[in-house]
Amino acid sequence: MLKFAILALALILSGLAGAKENKKKLSEVYSEKGYHYSALNEYFIETFRKPITVGMVSRLEELLYYTGIEILEDYEVQLLKKYPSSSTRFIIGRKAYQKKNYKEALEFFELMHPDHRFFPESRMMVAEIYAKQEKFDKQDEATNTCRQTAEKLENTAINKKIKRYFRMINEICLVNRARHLFNRGKFQESIDAYDKIPKKSYKWPYILLEKAWVYYQMGDYNRALGLLVTYKSPLLNTYFFPEAEYLTALAYFKMCLYDDSLTVIGQYYDSYRPRFNSLSAVLKKNMKSQDYFYNLMFKPGEELEKHEEFVKQIITRLKKQVRYSLDFNTIHKVNEEMREIVAKEPLKEQKRLVPHLHEVKTNMVSKINYNAKSDIFQFLETVPFFSEELFKLNLETISRKKDLVYKNKKLIADRSRGDYSNVNRSRFEYFWKFHGAFWADELGDYSLGLKSNCRAVRIEDERR
């Protein structure tokens, strides 16, 4: 009888334990209600003191599918290291990469599962690390893996946004390959890589300048100038780079078309440099603000309308970057979750959940603000450098012209310039005349037909 009683008690206790075990955790309850950000935070509270199982890792990946992994940036690395998931390893690796701790970055990237949705992006950073270490074979291998896995995941993705994400990763890896080929002096291979980037890619407007530098190094100044002319199209009016003006003036200079070079330099100093200085003065007043640059991007009615069109164009260009739209989308989803909780949950539950969501939102706003500020000031920092380079080029151009006068010489070419014979083209390229209008399907395919003017003759000899 005693044994039976003990057994019965054991069964009762076992049943209670089972009932307790079967009771849903808060993180599961929040997930079912659609409170995914609250569920993720509750998940960490529930598990961080427990041994992590395979099921816990799967559960974490499931939650991150809804919240996105950027939210993990708010958690300590030591906490993330406890969870052996590909998502946490990606974030830890990326943080190490940003801090230039390449050994740790490679360690965590190599632990990621090859079928994970962020594996292609991890290969992109692995390739960049190997490029810095000049391990070119490993770099090429990582780049190829990035492109292959991104293409595979794009083809299997159902969601259009996810498809675009993997296409973007594929294209970034291709652009990085083109850059590294350029750095190795493999110019034609670099051009071939750049040419694979479709014009619909968000990266395409940026690579025009990079391709122009490749053609410049190849000595094809006409093709470089043609690419740079593309930025004058109304479709690309938000893309202005001081570097493009410098390269334009430099290409004219290399062809000894000194008047053209001086015209470009003059336009830069008369039109663009004062606007840069004005922009810099305004933005520097708000460098310490935690939300000024965020408002500049996402609250145009309050901030952006105060500035001239030039500033609006720069901000519009930044907003086209994928990372800003992803982060802003996170803020939108957090706001939606807060509204749902306030509308449906009792006050006690609101006090438990809403403060954390406010903190998440504040962190995301600060992140966007910091990245936007960094991008804007990084752009502005190029202005003094290229202004100085243009100033040096201006002096050298004037010096060359004076030298011709002192030697009683002139350059041989007259102003009747431009001929198809001066254009380098492959057998697959056709001629389309430019009639003063930019056609979308022709953008990026322009080449000038200028003849080099670098032969000098004595003025007396010419008169004979």
Image (cartoon, rainbow, N blue to C red):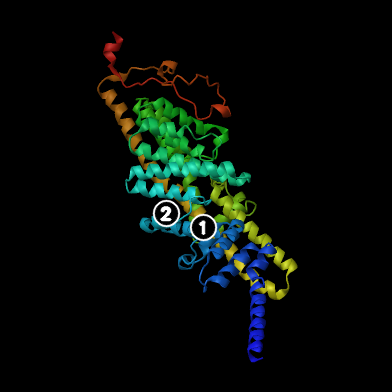
Q: Nearer the viewer, residue 292 or 71?
A: 71
User: Which of the 4 image quarters holds residue 200?
Assistant: top right
Where is residue 80 drawn, in percent x and y? 49, 65
User: What residue is rendered at 54% in x and 60% in y?
Assistant: 366
Residue 302, label in figure: none
Q: In the rendered structure, which amino acid carries the disc numbered 2?
A: Glu
Q: Nearer the viewer, residue 264 or 464?
A: 264
* Residue 252 visible in the current orientation: yes
Q: Which residue is mark 2?
A: 110
Say which quadrant the C terminus sits in. Answer: top left
User: What residue is rendered at 65% in x and 52% in y?
Assistant: 301
Where is residue 315 drawn, in percent x and y? 55, 47
Q: Is residue 261 left or right of residue 116?
A: left
Element under disc 2: helix
Where is residue 70 drawn, in percent x and y? 54, 58
Q: Is residue 47 above or below residue 452?
A: below
Tally of numbered tags: 2
User: What residue is rendered at 32% in x and 46% in y?
Assistant: 135
Q: Nearer the viewer, residue 243 or 58?
A: 58
- State which tag comes first along the sequence, 1 or 2: 1
Distance from disc 1 to disc 2, alpha carbons, whole Å, reads 12 Å
Give the residue furthest to the right. 344
User: Which of the 4 image quarters holds residue 411?
Assistant: top left
Q: Which residue is mark 1?
A: 87
Element under disc 1: helix
Dot 2 alpha-carbon crowd within 10 angstroms: few under 14, some 14 to 19, many 20 or more: some
User: Which of the 4 image quarters holds residue 425?
Assistant: top left
Q: Is residue 273 left or right of residue 317?
A: left
Where is residue 252 drawn, in percent x and y? 38, 28
Q: Is residue 420 above or below residue 331?
A: above
